[in-house]
Image (spheres, rainbow, N blue to C red):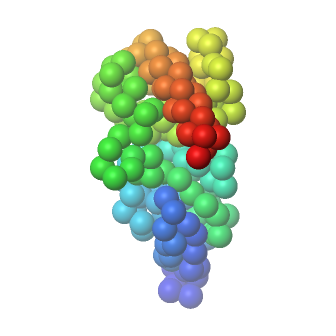
Amino acid sequence: MQASDLMRIELTVNGRREAGHAEPRMLLSDFIRHTLGLTGTHVGCEHGVCGACTVMVDGAPMRSCLIFAVQAAGAEIITVEGLATDAALSPLQEAFREHHGLQCGFCTPGFLISALDLIGRKPDLDEQAVREGLSGHLCRCTGYEGIVAAVLAAAKRMQAQNADQQAAQETA
Ligand code: FES
Ligand code: FES
C-alpha cells in the first residue's frame, strides 16, 4: 500500500469535525477505533451479525463493520462517546446502569445506539417492541431482561423530560 492509495476522509463525529486517512478497504469501525481513537465502538463478529459495532450514521443506526470508511465521508456520526453530556450519563445510559442492562459491557455501545434510535421513533414502546427493535443485537451475558427493562425505563423518562421541556417552552 502506497501513501498515494490512502484517501483523506472528513466527517463529523459526536458534533466535532474529524479527518483522517484510510485505505479504500478500511472498515468504518476500524477508522473510528484506530484512526480516531474512539474505542467505545466495539467489534465482535465483523460481518454484520452481532450489532456491537453499531453507530448512528446520518441519523440512522448502522453496523460500522459493514461500511467502508470512505463511504462515510461527509457523514454525521454518533458513537457511544457522544451520548453522555458534561460528564453525566445520558438518561438511557443511566437506565442501563440502574436496571443492570450490562455485565461485561461488550455489546452495550451497540445496544445503546439502537435503543436511542428506537425510542426516538417509537416513544410509547412496550416490551414486545423493545425486543423486536433490538433483536439484531446479541448479548452473551445478560439474558436481555435487564436491557429490555432499561430501555423501557429510559423511554418513559425521556418522554417525561420532553413533556416538561415542551410545557416550559409553552409557558416561556
Ligand atoms: Fe459489526 Fe458484529 S462487529 S455486527
Ligand atoms: Fe456482555 Fe452483553 S453485557 S455481551
Q: Which residue is at the far front?
A: 171
Relative side of 114 to 154, left or right: right
Q: Is residue 52 above or below residue 137?
A: below
Q: Is residue 33 visible?
A: yes
**Front-most of residues 132 and 89:** 89
Residue at horizontal 55%, vertical 66%?
A: 12
Q: Residue at x 60, y 40 (%)?
A: 171
Vertical side of 105 occupied by 74: above or below: below
Q: Residue at x 32, y 44 (%)?
A: 88
Q: Nearer the viewer, residue 1 or 85?
A: 85
Position of residue 90 measured from the top left corner of the image (x, y, whole percent): 41, 39
Residue at position x 69%, y 33% from top? 121
In the foreground, 42 or 85: 85
Q: Determine if residue 65 is in view.
A: no
**Looking at the rendering, which quadrant does residue 103 occupy?**
top left
> Could you say where residue 153 lies in the image, as x and y percent from the top left?
47, 20
Residue that sits furthest to the bottom in the current view:
4
